[in-house]
Structures are given as C-alpha cells and as structure tokens.
Image (cartoon, grey):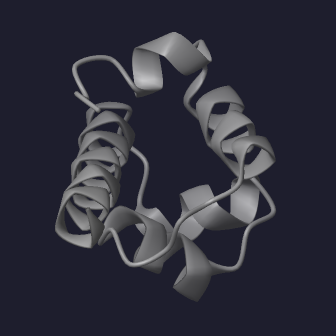
Amino acid sequence: MAKRNNQLLTDLGNRIRMLREQGGFAQEKFAFTIEMDRSFYGMVERGERNISFLNLAKIAKGLGLPLEEVVKGIKS
C-alpha cells in the first residue's frame, strides 16, 4: 500500500510540474505567486509531500485550472 501511495504522490507531482511548465511559470516564481514556500512546493512536484486539499486548491487556482483538471488522469 505504501508503494502505491508513493506512486500517487509522484504522479500528482509530475502532473503539477507539467501543467506549471505548460503555463510558462518558473518553479520559484510560481511558488511565490501562490504564497507557498518554494522548497515545500519543490517537494510536492517531486512527490515527496502529501499535500492538503487546500494546498492542492491553491495550486489549481495559481494554474488557472479547476481542481479536476489538475488531477486528471491520475489513477487511484
């Protein structure tokens, strides 16, 4: 179960990174814009942090996307 949870976090982080890059945002500037610590945000993109729903909503808002678009394609 732990291995699957780690894969979910990695998949989510990869998806967030891809969307951020598609939006043309640098990681540090994006983290600053959404008022999130850059090192914490980096850990999210690497799948090292299990973020809260509120932080996920903050990321989606910063990307200008609905939550469902951010998690699209990630299989539980």
Tell me the quarter of the picture where residue 53 sits. top right
* Residue at 22% across, 19% down: 73
**How many marks do you count on the picture?**
0
* Residue at 59% across, 80% down: 40
> Going by the image, does 43 lie left or right of 32?
left
* Residue at 71% across, 34% down: 57
Q: Where does the image place residue 6, in percent across and percent down from the top left?
A: 27, 67
Q: Nearer the viewer, residue 3 or 43?
A: 3
Q: Where does the image place residue 66, in percent across and percent down from the top left?
A: 60, 12
Q: Where does the image place residue 20, in percent across and percent down from the top left?
A: 38, 43
Q: Where does the image place residue 62, in percent across and percent down from the top left?
A: 66, 36
Up the image or down, 53 lies above or below 22; here it is: below
For the C terminus, the quadrant is top left
Q: Nearer the viewer, residue 37 or 29?
A: 37
Question: Can residue 65 be seen in the rendering of this structure?
Answer: no
- The residue lying furthest to the bottom in this view is 39
Question: Can residue 36 be seen in the rendering of this structure?
Answer: yes
* Residue at 44% across, 26% down: 70
> Going by the image, does 26 lie left or right of 50?
left
Up the image or down, 46 lies above or below 39; here it is: above
Up the image or down, 75 lies above or below 62; here it is: above
Tell me the quarter of the picture where residue 72 sits. top left
Tell me the quarter of the picture where residue 31 sits. bottom right
For the N terminus, the quadrant is bottom left
